[in-house]
Amino acid sequence: MTPRAWTSVQPGHLIAAPVVVLVLLLALLLGARASVSNLALLATGFGAIVLVANPSLGLPAVLLSALLLPLSIPTGTEVMLHPVVFVLAAVAGLSLLKSVRAQRFVLAASPANLPLLLFLIAGLLSFAVGNATWDWMVPHKSNFWLVQFAQWAIFALSAAAFWLTANTVRSIAALQRLTWLFLGVAGALALLRMASVTAPLANAISTGAFIRAPLWVLLIALGGGQLLFNRSLGAAARIFLLAVIVAVLFYAFVEARSRLHVGRDRCCDGSAGLAALASAALADDRDGRSAGRQRRALSLFLRICRR
């Protein structure tokens, strides 16, 4: 290539060539050692690049990874990590770096900020005091401190998710998009679980969140709240939300009850959401009798759970 030809090469071409070579090398290496872990690592790297280029996709990425990545990453202990842990940590870290670069780090005002911060500090103090006063004659594993710190990190990441949402969702439109992303994905999976033909597919692509009570309570409460208070919903959205509520009740009162050892606990998943909905609806009543009606709704919820 002549010197004049070198000067005519665009900077983008110089970057593209190493990228192409890197992709081919990764294809060679990962193809020879194909595994779910390597695929997850590759997807994580690609996702990190996308998040750096477009940080606004952070919260949707956290939400989708919590619902749609049924992978478990071994840690060398009895505890397995879910990919959402790393996605949430990465998104929170990118948000923090963005604030540091802009020299503007301000938490959205909330009464929950101080209690949550004190709770995390108390957890660290408990961790430090507990290890300082530990009787070393009592046997323990070599990763004892790491396991304890990881348990505290669960609360820290939960707080990070809380603050991340409060500080990155800046408009009603953004909150609506995030809400409907959850309702669309979780609701569709709940509907797929109802039919014996589609249930295996739903179980294959969904995470363990779908066997936990909080997801079902959130799904029925959020979907029912939209039905009760969102006057702008169209007919299709209302039909979808009604179907989702039916799916939640089917899971709580039919599917879960068929498992005798967990029937009663899972029954409360749906009835707790119904009680929350009833309380929210009755709180909008202005005739002065809403408190008594809320108590009756909660009493009905407890009665159902005791059956």
Image (cartoon, rainbow, N blue to C red):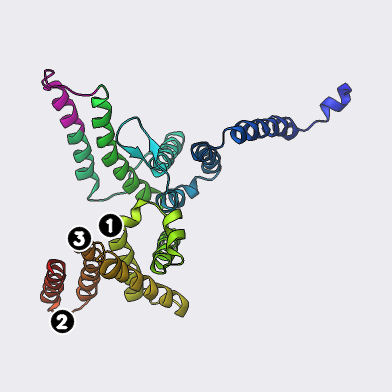
Instruction: Report if residue 83 lies within the magenta region.
Output: no
Under circle 1, the secondary element is helix
For residue 8, side relative to residue 267 (left or right): right
Task: Looking at the image, tell me whether mark 1 or mark 2 is earlier in sequence order.
Answer: 1
For residue 168, side relative to residue 280 (left or right): right
Q: Residue furthest top?
A: 137
Question: Pointer 3: what residue?
Answer: 265
Question: Pointer 1: what residue?
Answer: 214
Where 264 falls versus 117 (above or below)? below
* Residue 158, picture quadrant: top left
Specify the segment rendered in magenta: 124-141
Three-letter residue code for mark 3: Asp
Three-letter residue code for mark 2: Asp
Instruction: Report if residue 128 lies within the magenta region.
Output: yes
Residue 70 visible to the viewer: yes
Image position, residue 185 (x, y; %): 44, 61
| Label 3 neighbour load within 10 Å: few <14, some 14-19, many 20+ | some
